Amino acid sequence: MKKMITTCMAAAVVLTSNAVAEFNFDKAPEKLTTYYASALQPLDAVKSKLTANGFEILATTEILKGETVITITNNELKATNSYMATIQVLVNTVKNEIRVQNPSYLGAAYLQDKYQYGQFKATLTALEASLGTMNDVEEKHKFKELAGYRFMFGMPYLEDTIEIAKGDNLVEKLTAPEASKYIAYSVKLPNGATLVGHKLNKRTNKFLKKIEQEHNAQLLPYEAMIKDGKVTILDPKYYLALSLPLLSMTEFMKIATAPDQIAKDIKKAYK
């Protein structure tokens, strides 16, 4: 049965501190939903409500036809100094729904022993005030397994990142004349690192179609971290498996070339 987060005020209303207390995070569920789904709204209306509820909109990116991702952040997310400094919201006019990454799911995976269930309740409340009632989706994973997640034996963990480039002028490349072809957004984090969202080649994005996961286009744009003179990304074999927890090995074999192609696409921004 789908679990529904309690709606504490109409979607267009700006949050108050009282609304945050309406959520019950006393006990973590056995499984966390990877995403939340809500009713479709016009793109401009979603952007307006997100802004009204304290989010900064970093970019609007069409991943596939009829499927546009809004990348958002706020101070609570940026303070993690991690890949979850941003959240992706998919406005899907093909499936007539909105999907958003669950910050609790990402927090459990990325922050590991530093994560405490419920710490992103302010962000979740702000999301529901913007998007309306948010429902669990089928994609879920056991909460206790997310901190040490890997798809299977021999596959990468969170810390098994891939180095894309290194140098002294990496941040400057984000504003180069040709950068707009490759860069969707960038955000400076409190620890001095820069999180960058990358536009993948349209052909690369089609890996979602090969495994019939177009409705989960909110796992893109693909992000890189610039820190200490290096550009690194989460290994796609980790990130895609984490983001699509219901896929089988057979289904992943259908996109066996996608991880290398993703890395190649991102490297183009730093040449």
Image (tube, rainbow, N blue to C red):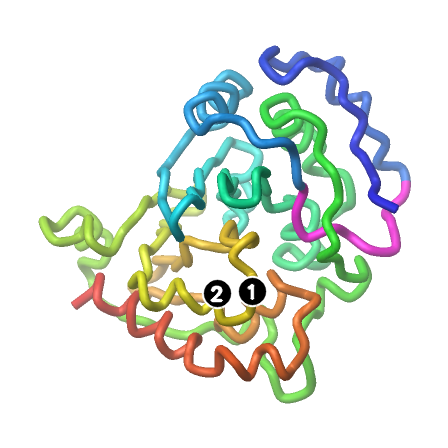
Q: Can residue 82 be seen in this view?
A: no
Q: Give the image quarter of residue 100.
A: top right
- Is 39 included in the stretch rendered in magenta? no
Q: Residue at x 33, y 55 (%)?
A: 198
| 240 relative to 108 in the view: left or right | left
Q: Residue at x 18, y 52 (%)?
A: 179
Q: Residue type at mark 1?
A: Glu
* In this view, 73 is above or below 42: below
Where residue 163 appears, as percent x and y from the top left, is 37, 73
Most foreground residue, 202 or 178: 202
Most foreground residue, 99 or 180: 99
Most foreground residue, 157 or 64: 64
Where, quadrant-wise, is the C terminus in this rendering? Answer: bottom left
- Which disc number belongs to residue 25? none
Where residue 116 appears, as percent x and y from the top left, is 76, 46
Q: Residue type at mark 2?
A: Lys
Q: How crowded is mark 2: few (under 14 residues within 10 Å), some or many (20 or more)?
A: few
Judging by the rendered image, the residue that carries numbered circle 1 is 212
* In this view, 268 is above or below 170: below
Question: Which residues, given as a range, are shown in magenta?
Answer: 27-36
Q: Distance between the residues labelled 1 and 2?
A: 5 Å
Judging by the rendered image, the residue that carries numbered circle 2 is 209
* In this view, 122 is above or below 147: above
Q: Can residue 169 be seen in this view?
A: yes
Q: Do the residues labelled 1 and 2 touch (CB within 8 Å)?
A: yes
Q: Residues within 10 Å of mark 1 (few under 14, many from 20)?
A: few
